[in-house]
Image (tube, helix red, strand yellow):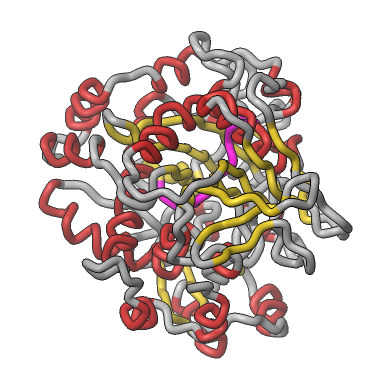
Amino acid sequence: MQRSSKTIQPGTFEPEHHWYEKALNATIHPLVSFFLNLDTERIIKRYCHLHPTVDAKMLRDLLIYRPKHFIWAGADLMHVTDENGNRKMVVIENNSCPSGQKSMPLLEDHQEQGGYKLLMERTIKPYLEQKKKLVQGGLAVVYDKNKMEASGYAHAMADVFNEPVHLVPFFKEDKEKLARFDDGTMYVQNEAKEWIPIRATFRYLTQEPWSRLPLHSKTHIFNPIVACLAGGRNKMVASKAYTFFNSELEQGGLEILTPETIWDISKLEIPFWVRRMGGQAVIKIPYSNAGQGVFTIVNEQELEAFMAQDFRYERFIVQSLIGNYNWSSTSSKGKLYHVGTMPSAKGNTYVADTRVMVSATSEGIKPLAVYARRAKLPLADTLEHGVSSWDMLGTNLSIKKEDGNWDSDTSRLILMDRRDFNKLGVGLDDLIDAYIQTVLSMIAIDKMAIQLFTSKNKFRMRLFKSLDNDQALLDEIML
């Protein structure tokens, strides 16, 4: 399939092209609106009131932290509890180019471009204005998924910068690519087949982006590839980043909460770790996304099916599985299970996760969007033979079609509006918890990204190899 670029002119944003129809016509829930408008000091006061051992000064410093590399993020969190009813929001992963705007009802005081324009105004433009050395050229948005949002960002960028923006498909499988790098500068091909130099690009590349975008670039990239390798698209290094940062957070009474994670696992080792967790676990290819490369294991049949597959990558991570209380993993963090949605009229409770999108601003890291997703099948009290655990536990909405393009199962989307929000079963304090966990995990990845460069801005490949020595991944990285 031959793809083509498009030049987006200022003043051409059309809301119906950049939101799901159900979100475009939705009214945001008052509680969610209240949360998104809370100032930092009120959040700190409330959080420390409920967590009296937390150091308020440390929390304040973290919420006003200014990232160097990872300036826009979206964490997926599970609302879990234990047998004593202690509820918490647990980080499953943090994403370096997250979706969310197309699922977010507009705030009452937002213009029609919503979070698209907000991200460009308060994050992308200020960061770009601070860059002292920029090549001469235009602006671009490159994407390999989620054209609805990628094009929304392109239109918003055109309006905020008041200049044309090149919207460029940049798929890894395309033989004739419409973007390339020459001596560190990105060039994109426009509709007239001309190659245009680009000074800055906003990228929505999700599929092994390090194979198309270099670590060192004269064109400024938001987010840069190091944000992916340091954890935004690398679950292996993310787990290590969280562990390292937790040692700093401990003195302030804070912690990034995650399932128990065993990293650097070869395929042959996996059955031992699954059995050590009681026969229930989650196996992940660390570099996949959109629900790809995640395998929920609750019985020997699912484990055998996983082991029968061939994989390009050599290293895996194994995490404790969060399921129903009767069939969750046994781990060093105790047995956690899903709070789930409020029971439906038929009495069904579904696993759901919450996505919190944030971005760096002059006043700190602020929330941008929130939405949730539920699993396909209700959460069962007991496991029946032949039932797919993924259908009960997997929440990602992405569907990869035969032509390589992506679609979404919006029937499982839970909006933050007056109709859907109450189904999710979370309150204001849960949203604050989710926001703080998102910020902490974002900072951990940013700090890891900083460590991966020398003082002379050279990528520390030897250090990266010590963190993730997967030759298949290393061979893909574009220096």
Q: Nearer the viewer, residue 52 or 251?
A: 251
Image location (x, y in percent) of residue 117: 53, 25
Query: Left or right: where does residue 407 sit relative to residue 82?
Result: right
Residue 114 on the magenta segment = no
Q: Nearer the viewer, residue 6 or 101?
A: 6
Image point (77%, 50%), residue name: 406
Q: Classify residue 236 by image quadrant.
A: bottom left
Image point (25%, 64%), residue name: 244
Query: Left or right: where does residue 45 sit relative to residue 356?
Result: left
Is residue 189 positioned above or below 17 on the image? below
Q: Nearer the viewer, residue 161 or 246?
A: 161
Image location (x, y in percent) of residue 292: 66, 62
The quadrant the N terminus occupies is bottom right
Image location (x, y in percent) of residue 126: 37, 33
Image location (x, y in percent) of residue 440: 30, 47
Is residue 234 positioned above or below 376 on the image? below
Q: Which residues are magenta?
A: 90-103
Is residue 366 positioned above or below 88 on the image? above
